[in-house]
Image (spheres, rainbow, N blue to C red):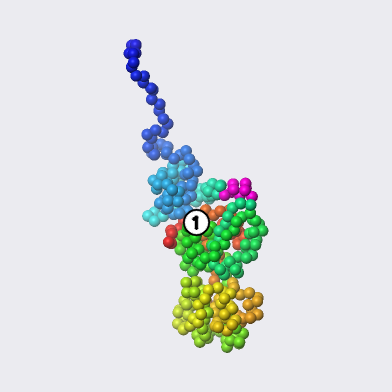
Amino acid sequence: MPRKLNAPLKTPKRRVAGANRPEADSEGGRFYYKGNRLKQLRAFVYITRLGTLSRAAEALFLSQPSVSLQLKALERELGAPLLERTRRRVTLTDAGEALYEMARPLVEGFENLDREFQAKTRGSQAGKLTVAAGSSTIQYLLPDLVKAFRERYPAVHLQLANVTGKDGLALLRADEADIAIGSMLDVPQDIAWAPVYHYDPMLIMPPDHPLAAKDDIRLEDLSPYGLILPPQRLTTFRLVDMVFQQRHVPYTVAIEVGGWDVIKQYVAMGLGISIVTGICITEADKERLVVRNLRRYFPQRSYGVVMRKGKFLSPEARAFIDLIRPGLLTHRDYDEPGHSGR
């Protein structure tokens, strides 16, 4: 039949691939997220590192259903369950363990692609590393490590953030520091700590002090003399107080002051005695002070690497940690998922 004049032309409808398709088809169908394997692997690695879908979604700036669908798509395509879900967190299956070991370096490589590119193309502007540490750690423990790192990686901008323990954890949680180096008494669930260096507690006193002539000094012998200790908020004060309290031995704090060098100077001046960590005792100190080991009463202080669980460590951070102890990062503890202690 001839078409009527001025009748509107009908445009044939085009079928758009995937239009109006549900995010997940029937049991035998394909998942909507099948096309992007990198997104699936990132979701899987983030869930494994952070412990829950909700925390992974927050870190990836996605909705929780989106992350869940990416995980389901990956499991469907690989034909194996990767995670076992419980009320509080997820755990890896055997297949998940195998995939995690393969997927983690791929995802980390993608996460650090920009940094690696800048390192290879900008020369002197190649990368930045921020290490949080306390004054004593920076002064007595880090100099040799910093020197070795600078000699090996002269193009990296190294920043040492001089902070106390709590402030260092805050920097880690805010991603304002890559790692921290120091000592810890209580380790929050979202923090991993790998102790490396161990130092004995030491009693220091001036050469003319009444206790200087004694080789075997008991805790009770310290009671008559005033102690010079760091501020109460610091770990050393807490350890000293804990030991005296547990043994029901009275003690007196004569001076409360920060800085091992200041404490050693005041002790040398005869203003009191002190209990310090062996990390701060130098050969020069042994010429002006009498030093006695108190490991019999006080625990050793351990110093090591502090990291936020779930953080992708930069190549610069890994290189610095390898200088501290090669192979330290082969242990899984540092990237086990954890819940924030904030």
Magenta residue check for 117: yes
Mark 1 Cα shell of 10 Å, populated few (<14), some (14-19), many (≥20): few
Residue 193 % position (x, y): 52, 63
Task: Say above or below: 134 vs 49.
Answer: below
Q: Does 287 sit left or right of 185 as displayed?
A: right
Residue at image coords 50%, 56%: 175
Q: Which residue is mark 1?
A: 175
Residue at image coords 50%, 51%: 97
Q: The residue tagged with tag 1: helix, strand or loop?
A: loop
Task: Check the image and name the residue furthest to the right.
Answer: 151
Residue at image coords 33%, 13%: 4
Residue 106 % position (x, y): 54, 47
Residue 297 visible somewhere in the drawing: no
Task: Say above or below: 82 vs 9.
Answer: below
Q: Does 7 sit left or right of 323 as displayed?
A: left
Task: Check the image and name the residue furthest to the top.
Answer: 2
Q: Does 107 sit left or right of 88 as displayed?
A: right
> Closest to the observer: 174 or 5?
5
Which span of residues is magenta-colored?
A: 115-123
Quarter containing the C terminus: bottom left
Residue 101 % position (x, y): 53, 50
Residue at image coords 57%, 76%: 262
Numbered label tally: 1
Q: In the figure, residue 199 lies in which quadrant?
A: bottom right
> Mark 1 is on which residue type?
Asp
> Closest to the observer: 222 or 95?
222
Residue 16 visible somewhere in the drawing: yes
> Closest to the observer: 111 or 99?
111
Query: Main SS of the magenta segment?
Result: helix
Magenta residue check for 218: no
Quarter containing the N terminus: top left
